[in-house]
Amino acid sequence: MVHRFHLGETYIAVDVCSGSVHVLDELAYEIIGRFEEAGRDEVIAQTTARLGLPSAEAAECYDQVAALKAQGRLFTEDTFAPMAGDLKRRTAGVVKALCLHVAHTCNLNCAYCFASQGKYHGQRAVMPFEVGKQALDFLVAHSGTRHNLEVDFFGGEPLMNFDVVKRLVTYARAIEQEKGKHFRFTLTTNGMLIDDDVIDFANREMHNVVLSLDGRKEIHDRYRVDYAGNGSWDRVVPKFQRLVRARGGKNYYMRGTFTHANPDFLADIRTMLDLGFTELSMEPVVCPQDDPAALTKEDVAIVKQQYEELAFLMLDRWRQGRPFTFYHYMLDLADGPCIYKRISGCGSGTEYMAVTPWGDLYPCHQFVGEEAFRLGDVWRGVENETVRETFAACNVYARPECRDCWARLYCSGGCAANAWHATGSVRGVYAAGCELFRKRMECAIMLQAAMATEGEGKP
C-alpha cells in the first residue's frame, strides 16, 4: 500500500510496509497514483495528458518508480501479519513500566477530567509508602532482564503526596545497584504545589516532568479551576516558568487539552511559545459525546486545519533557528521503532500497568476504577489472566478496520482505552481519534521530510 498526500508545495508518498517516505515532484506524484491501475503505456499517456509534459519525461519517471518497486521501496507487500502478537508472547510476564497513582485526590476541579477530579469514580486516597515500595519491588521482580525501568508519578495531583514520592525515589535508588536496574522517573503535575523543594527534587531525580497547561489564560481558566471556581493560570504559569528555567529548558512537556472551547488550539500553542515554553503537547479531550467539552464534527475539521498550520509554523521557526517540539510530530523516519513494536502497540496490560493507592493493578491509568479490568495487586501479582490475555492479543491486525489504513504502523492499532470508551471493546476503533491521528501523521511526515531535504536538524 502507498499513501500519497501533499501539504503546501510538498508532495509525498509513504510506502506503508517498507516505511519508505518519498518526497516527489508533481509528475512522480501522478505516476505513483496511477501505477497499479494501468499498464506502462497507458499511465504515461494519462500523465502526459494530465500535466502537459513530454512523454519521454513521463516515461523516465515511470521507470524510476518501477525501479523503486523492484527495490522494495514502493508498493511493498504486507508480510507482518504472522508476527502479530509474537513480541508480547516472547515477553509474557515481563513488566517494564508502572504508573503509580500516588494521589487519588486533586486540588483542582477540572470539569473535563477523565479521572473524576482524581477520584477515579471511587474514594479520595493517597498511596502509603508501603504500597509504593511493594509496587517497586513488584516491578523489579517482574522485569526479567530489563535494565531500565520506568515509573510515572501520577494522580490526581501527585504533589499532594510529595513526601511519599521522595521516599519512593530514595528507596528505588538504594536498590538499583543490588538489583541491576536503573529507574527513570516522570512526574505529572498541575503546578499548584510547585515550590523550590519540588523544583530541586524534580531537576535532580525526574527524567521528565509533564506540566498541565491549556494555553491561553481564558481557555485554561475555563476548565482548570479550584474548588471555589477560580482559574489557576495566574498561579501556575510563573511556577512552570521557574521550573523550566531551572531544568535548562529540557526534559519537560507542557501538556494541554483542547476541547469544544478551543479547537483553534494553535492560539494556545502560540501562547505557550510566548511564555518561553518550547516542549509542547496538546491532546484532544476524552469525554462522552454529550459532554459540553466534547469535540463536534465541525470542531474536528478545524483541528485538522490547525494541525497543518502548526506544521508550517514549526517549519518556519526551524528555518529561523527557533525550533520547538510538538509531541505528536516527533517521528524518526530513519530509525523508528522496530516492526514488532509497530504492530504490537503500547504494551498496556502486559509491559505497562497502573497501580492504585491500594496496590491494585490495572492495564493503564485510563482503566483505573473499572473493576472488570482489575488485573490483580502488587502483592500477589497478576491474577486475572483473562484480562491480561485480552490486552496481549491487542495488535494492529486484531482490528479488521486497521488492515486498510495507511497509518496502521504508526499507531499500532491505537489506544485500547479510547477504543473501549468509544465502542465498548479494547479491540474497537475510535473513529474520530483515527481521523485526527492520520492528519497528525501526514503533518509530521511532511515536516520531517521538508527539513530533511533542506538540511540537518529536527524540530
Image: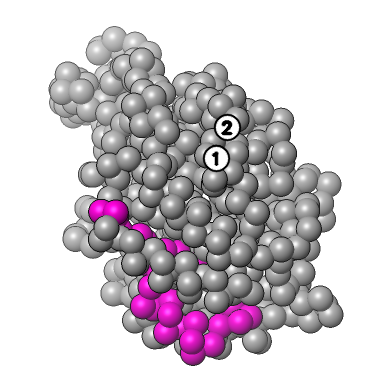
Observer able to see residue 393: yes
Query: Image check: 329 left or right of 384?
Result: left
User: Looking at the image, is 169 positioned above or below residue 410?
Assistant: below
Mark 1 near mark 2, Cβ–Cβ under 8 Å? Answer: yes
Q: Does residue 416 belong to the magenta stretch?
A: no
Q: Secondary structure at mark 1?
A: loop
At x 70%, y 69%, the residue is 106
How far apart marks 1 and 2 lie (CA) works out to 7 Å
Instruction: Tell me the element at label 2.
Output: loop
Residue sitting at x 46%, y 83%: 199
Residue 452 location in percent, x, y?
A: 23, 53
Q: Quadrant of the N terminus?
A: top left
Disc sitting over residue 420 in the figure: none
Near mark 1 (Cα within 10 A), the count class, few <14, some 14-19 or many ≥20, is few
Residue at (47%, 67%) from the top-left corner?
168
Q: How many marks?
A: 2
Q: Nearer the viewer, residue 356 or 321?
A: 356
Q: Nearer the viewer, residue 285 or 151?
A: 151
- Frontmost residue, 231 versus 5: 231
Q: Where does the image place residue 318, in percent across and percent down from the top left? A: 32, 68
Q: Quadrant of the C terminus?
A: bottom left
In the rendered image, residue 410, in percent from the top left (x then y), is placed at 41, 38
The x and y percentages for residue 341 are 36, 35
Task: Please tell me whether mark 1 or mark 2 is closer to you in this view.
Answer: 1
Task: Identify which residue is drawn at 62% across, 47% down.
Answer: 360
Q: Which residue is mark 2?
A: 383
The residue that disc 1 covers is: 380
Q: Which residues are magenta?
A: 179-208
The amino acid at mark 2 is: Glu
Residue 324 at least partly seen: no
Q: Residue furthest top?
A: 39
- 187 inside magenta stretch: yes
